[in-house]
Image: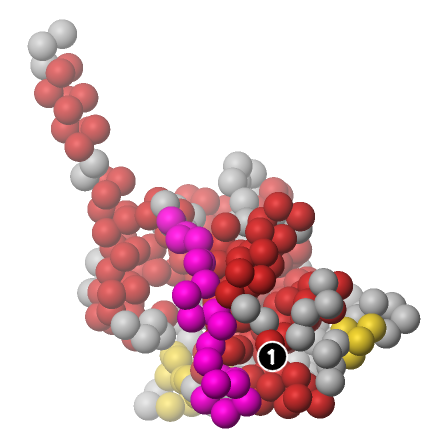
Amino acid sequence: MLHATPNGAPVLDPATKLAVDGFLDRYDNPSTRELYEIDLRIFLTWCRTHGIDPLAIRRPQLEAFSRYLTLERRNSTATVAHRLGVVRSFYEVAVDDELLDRNPARLLRVPRVHTDPARMIGLDRREFGAILTAARHHSPDRWALVALLGLMGLRVTEACSIDVESFHQRVERGHQVLSFVGKGSKPATAPIPVPVLRALEEARGDRTSGPLLVRHDGERLDRRTAHRWVKRLGVVAGIDKPVTPHALRRTYVTLALDAGVPPREVQRGARHAKLDTTMRYDVARLDMDRHANHSLAAFVAGAM
């Protein structure tokens, strides 16, 4: 069973700790591991509060946990689906590790998340130009961050991980390149366009090593701080919708397709595992350009 520390955090019995450690140890990416650890902590704390042994839980009790996330924690549908997915995966691994005979979450009802295709479309050319200009005028670090996200399609954790050594004096086949570790711990190398290189060199200054992007305290830029930087730049640029680091990555895909880059090449640039992911962006942007509403309005206008 679970016990509680003075601050309310769950203390795991040996069997549960073995199951948790076995699940988390599957993930090498620190950000993924941290996120899943938070999800499991919420679940295990709920179990402790209700006197439930996580390794003896039943599906109806898991349904109660789902209602707790929705009604008491007021998590969004997407967050509930994510956290229940983590719990279900946790039990799948526990069964595979022979710590349980069955997966109590196998038939757990997970809410469907419906995504508006229009939300996949990033900033338009004018909006991205405005935020890039705002970043350049603010500071070299912010300029480099926006360039990495919007002109090279990096994920925010990838951009934060860049060291000066990742690009300084690195040349392959006549191109200065950026080397980094991408999603799934996959190494990646990409050529650096001249406008991005200028931003990176400004951020580098006279340094030859160490993290490229740093916070005001001199520490490496982290995901949360990067999110605040980008959000603030969106306001400064006069963009009347939320701007996040991932929105800038979506902008990379959308504007590359607008520029006529073949989807397969955009897939390679964005490092999407499947072409279907890239094509969803393409469908979303074409749906807006070729929507039936435009044709109908033009047809009716001819009779007025």
Along the line of sight, which residue is nearer the eye, 84 or 279? 84
Residue 104 percent location from the top left of the image: 49, 72
Residue 131 percent location from the top left of the image: 53, 50
Q: Residue at x 10, y 14 (%)?
A: 302
The answer to whether any part of residue 187 appears in the image is yes
Vertical side of 216 occupied by 67: above or below: above
For residue 166: magenta?
no
- Please name the residue that numbered disc 1 is placed on: 55
Q: Main secondary structure of the magenta part?
A: loop
Residue 277 sits in quarter: bottom left
Secondary element at tag 1 = helix
Q: What residue type is labelled 1?
A: Leu
* 74 relative to 115 in the view: left or right: right
* 162 relative to 260 in the view: left or right: right
The answer to whether any part of residue 176 appears in the image is no
Along the line of sight, which residue is nearer the eye, 201 or 227? 227
Residue 121 percent location from the top left of the image: 36, 50
For residue 99: magenta?
yes
Along the line of sight, which residue is nearer the eye, 20 or 179? 20
Residue 72 percent location from the top left of the image: 67, 48
Q: How many C-alpha atoms fall within 10 Å of the one at disc 1: few (<14), some, or many (≥20)?
A: some
Q: Residue at x 36, y 45 (%)?
A: 116
Q: What stretch is highlighted in magenta?
A: 93-114
Vertical side of 30 occupied by 237: above or below: above
